[in-house]
Image (tube, grey):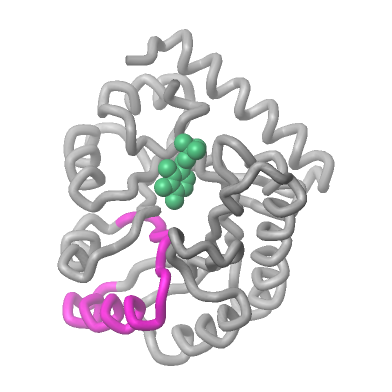
Amino acid sequence: MITKELAVKNLDKVISKVEGARLRISEHHIVKIIGISKYSQADEISTLYSAGQRAFGENKVQDLKEKMNTLEELPLEWHFVGRLQKNKINNLIDLKPTLMHSLDSLELATELNKKLEAKKTTMKCLLQINSAKEDSKSGVQPEEAVEIYKTILDNCPNIKLVGVMSIGAHVDERAIIKASFDTTKKIYDELTPLGAKYCSMGMSGDFELAIACGSNMIRVGSSLFK
Ligand SMILES: *Cc1c(COP(=O)(O)O)cnc(C)c1O
């Protein structure tokens, strides 16, 4: 359990690193911080809220539901960042998340669109790209990403695609992590004429590098909650 004091300290540390990294790009390069609360309890999220953090994310639909319910009094923004199983799609739709970061295949998009249509609603989503081409990660292949993005725009009117998401390469070599972020950013740049607004990349271990590569949305968990 983190104390209010520690929450403020953690958040300040992340904010000042983000400030440094974004100002190296431009004063106008704004980066949104999503606090990933998957290893934390509702009272810890509430502590982070009192330190100033407003946007949080979960990777399991059930956890998202429980934490949203427990914290419904607070004006929080909720993001979904995990692998979405087909049998959980309706549950996620009912939670009306602010943004779904992990649309990871055309197949999932088709299924999600069908269920959104049936419920007469829409969902803002990011297309997840497996830029490091790691078997352990989901996401579309980088060379197919633009085509799949366009196909979803054309065929899934209930999905509001607003950008891309990626997880940096899971290695120690900075150059390889940077290459995976560069790959995602290049795809993002191709998609901005089609309405892409968010390039969600960077986690606790690599968010400064991700911002240097052009990320405008980072997902940090352990550096805020530990
Ligand atoms: C857990 C998780 C994060 C946060 O990871 P940390 O290393 O704890 O900052 C970010 N993105 C996704 C998709 C995650 O599952």
In-image side of 43 versus 164 (left or right)? left
The answer to whether residue 204 is above or below residue 150 is: above
Tell me which residue sits at (57%, 49%) in the image: 170
Rendered image quadrant of residue 15: top right
State which quarter of the image contains the N terminus: top left
Q: Nearer the viewer, residue 47 or 59?
A: 59
- List x then y, in percent, for residue 24: 83, 41
- List x then y, in percent, for residue 203: 55, 42
Magenta region? 97-121
Q: Nearer the viewer, residue 90 or 98?
A: 90
Q: Nearer the viewer, residue 137 or 59?
A: 137
Residue 112 falls inside the magenta stretch:
yes
The answer to whether residue 1 is above or below residue 24 is: above
In-image side of 104 versus 211 (left or right)? left
Tell me which residue sits at (42%, 39%) in the image: 36
Rendered image quadrant of residue 100: bottom left
The answer to whether residue 46 is above or below residue 26 is: above
Q: Is residue 136 visible?
A: yes
Tell me which residue sits at (60%, 59%) in the image: 199
